[in-house]
Amino acid sequence: MHDTQMTRRTPSSHHTIGPFFPADYFRPGDNDLTRISPDAAPTAKGTPFVLTGTVRKEGGDPVANAILEIWQADSEGRFRHPEDPEADLADPDFLGWGRAWSTAEGHYSFRSVRPGSYSENGQMRAPHLNILVMGIGLMRLAETVLFFPEHPEENAQDPVLSVLPEDLRHMLVLRDLGTSEGVQTYGFDILLRGPRGSETPFFET
C-alpha cells in the first residue's frame, strides 16, 4: 500500500467569506415599509415609527454590510399574502417588508408603522416584527422576533416569546428612544454571538 493511501485526511473548513451582494441588490427606499414603492405616498393608516440599532459580532466589533430584512402585519394585523384569510382587507398602501444594510459602524434603520395583533393557530400574537440578518461569515440566516414595550400583557402571552426562558424575554423587547420630529423611535442592537444574556436570542427556522 502506498504511503499516500495511508495518510489520514481531515475535513477542510467551511467556506465562510460569503455571501456577497451586487450593488443593485438595494434600492432607494428599501428600508421604508410604509411605501409600496419609493415614489408612492406613505400609508395613512397606523402609527409610524423608526427602528434603529447596530449589528455587532463577538467582542463587540461592528459588522459592516450586514443585510437585515423585516416583515410584519399592517396596523390592523393583516398581511398582503395569500395565506392570510383576510389578505383582501390588508392595507393596500403598506408594503409590510423591508431591507436595510449596516454601515461601517454597524448601524441600520427602518421606517414602518406599528403592527396590529392577530390570531395564529388559535393563539393571539402580540404586535411584533420578524427580522433576519445575513452577512459575511454567517453559516445560516439569523432570525428573531422583536416586540413592542407598550404591550407587556400581550407579550407575556405571545406563544413565540414564551418559548424563551423568562430571564431572556426582555432581550427581544424594543427600547423606547422617545420621539424625533414627532415620530416614535425604537432601538434594538443585535449581537450575533456572545455569552448568555448578551447574545441576541435567535430562532431556528
Image (tube, rainbow, N blue to C red):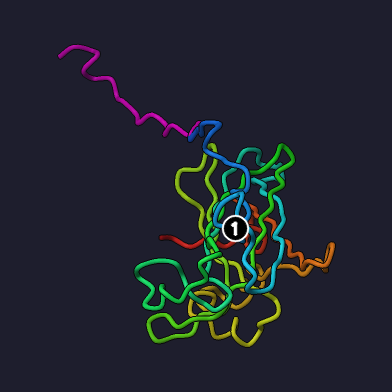
Residue 180 left/right relative to 56: right
Total number of numbered discs in the rendering: 1
Measuring from the top left, give residue 198's x and y in whole percent.
67, 59
Residue 80 left/right relative to 194: left
Taking depth in this image into account, of 201 and 43 the one nearest to the observer is 43
| Magenta segment, prevailing SS (helix, strand or loop) | loop
Q: Quadrant of the N terminus?
A: top left
> Is residue 15 in the magenta section?
yes
Q: Residue at x 70, y 80 (%)?
A: 150
**Image quadrant assignment for residue 113:** bottom right
**Image quadrant assignment for residue 46:** bottom right
Measuring from the top left, give residue 143's x and y in whole percent.
51, 58
What residue does disc 1 label? Answer: 35
Number of residues whose C-alpha sits closer than 10 Å to that of mark 1, classed few (under 14), some (14–19) or many (20 or more): many
For the residue marked with disc 1, what is the amino acid? Arg
Measuring from the top left, give residue 39's x and y in whole percent.
61, 50
Span of residues in magenta: 1-18
Position of residue 129 relative to residue 158, above or below, is above
Taking depth in this image into account, of 133 and 119 the one nearest to the observer is 119
**Residue projecting furthest to the top:** 2
Position of residue 128 relative to residue 58, above or below, is below
Can residue 144 be seen here? The reply is no
Residue 154 left/right relative to 10: right
Q: Quadrant of the C terminus?
A: bottom left
> Is residue 138 in the magenta section?
no
